Amino acid sequence: MVRSFCTTGRFWGATLVTVSCYGALTPVADAASRKVAQQTQQSAEPVEKSDFRRFIESLWPEAQARGISRATFNEAFQGVGLDQKIVALTRKQSEFNQPIWEYLEGAISTTRLTRGRELAREWSQTLDGIERAYGVPRSVVLGIWGMETNFGSFTGSIDAVRALATLAFVRYRGDFFRDELLNALQILQQDHIDRDKLLGSWAGAMGQTQFMPSSFLKYAVDGNGDGRRDIWASVPDALASTANFLRQQGWQPGLPWGFEVALPEGFDFRNHRQGFSGWESLGLRRTDGKPMPRSGEATLFLPAGARGPAFLVTNNYPVIKTYNSSDAYALGVALLGDRIFGGPPIRSAWPKDEPALDMSQRQELQKRLQRLGHDVGEPDGKVGSKTREAVRQFQLQRGLVPDGYADPSVLRELRAAR
């Protein structure tokens, strides 16, 4: 989903879509949001309904300043209450908690591949036009469509206003969801969709390719020429909007996202980024048998360390991560799209025999790296690009294989480091 947060500069997603974070809450609303956050953590009694209602009413001046009418505001929040189930879901993100091979196995299922190939044929002409207009390959667009909603088969059934209001009230990811809630009100004010149809994920992502409200307002386009931007019911609108989003985030036409490679015997893992010709001279070969691109640069990406599959990824790979900042997600999108159009499965085996760090161990690893001066972002137990690079730098300093993989051996070295 297009879901980057204030902590990254885009839900986590989602790295990232530009986010404008709004100012502090009113004292009453802020105190109430702290109260519910503490109660949620301590499994205490639910916060009083009056606290949540005061928070909602505190949004009115800012909503009014955005051109939202009182009638739209009242209709949007009629019957909306705090949802503790949504608060609980903030602690469960499979793309950050599952081993990457398990995540990819579920993402690139036989059923999903079959459905994707059928839809690639059905929407072939639409995809032709999208590629011409935006320069984003159909494989990536279909990969996102498949990963987000299984090609539109399930776009979410949670009331988006309720979800966003809940997350805004407890200040999950700072003020990000407060802003998204106000953006959702603008979508209603501009009559893009009826209030009772504004449904989506637990985090407020909507439509066939799961746009956050801010992304809809900024990047949604009319793909079928009917004068509307309907990412909910119109496949052309949803796919064209996705391609427009990726192009605006920096997608470079003609450049692949990357591909799997086979490393030569005795490869020096200190090699990290260089031109394709340089990689070729070091003995790297594409596992699909195709030649290396004639120009461009790529980074060696080892999602499961030196013992697992190896990829060369270009600057288009982090563009996919602007949709969701998880490497598992981005790799799922890329590989699913490639497989839909005849690409081979991953050739190298995953190191499934190696124990994985649990959440508390990943947090400990991040905190120890942070104490040594490495930038890991927020030590939240989610291993992203910053943590990988910090691990790689630590490995280089300690004379370890610099594969950037956070495993028990790295944690042991960190515990021994001064």
Image (spheres, rainbow, N blue to C red):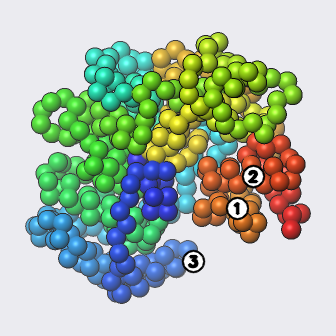
The CA distance from mark 3 to mark 1 is 32 Å
Q: What's the amino acid at mark 3?
A: Gln
Q: Is residue 107 above or below residue 129?
A: below
Q: What's the amino acid at mark 2?
A: Gln
Q: Residue at x 57, y 20 (%)?
A: 293
Contact (Cβ within 8 Å) of mark 2 with mark 1? yes
Left or right position of 250 against 95 = left
Q: Residues within 10 Å of mark 1 (few under 14, many from 20)?
A: some
Q: Residues within 10 Å of mark 2 (few under 14, many from 20)?
A: some
Q: Residues within 10 Å of mark 3 (few under 14, many from 20)?
A: few
Residue 212 is marked as none
Left or right position of 37 against 376 = left
SS state under label 1: loop
Q: Residue at x 61, y 13 (%)?
A: 290
According to the image, label 1 marks what residue? 374
According to the image, label 3 marks what residue? 42
Q: Position of residue 294 (x, y in %)?
A: 57, 19
The CA distance from mark 2 to mark 3 is 37 Å
Residue 393 is marked as 2
Contact (Cβ within 8 Å) of mark 2 with mark 3? no
Which residue occupies the foreground of this view, 334 or 185? 334
Image quarter for residue 139? top left
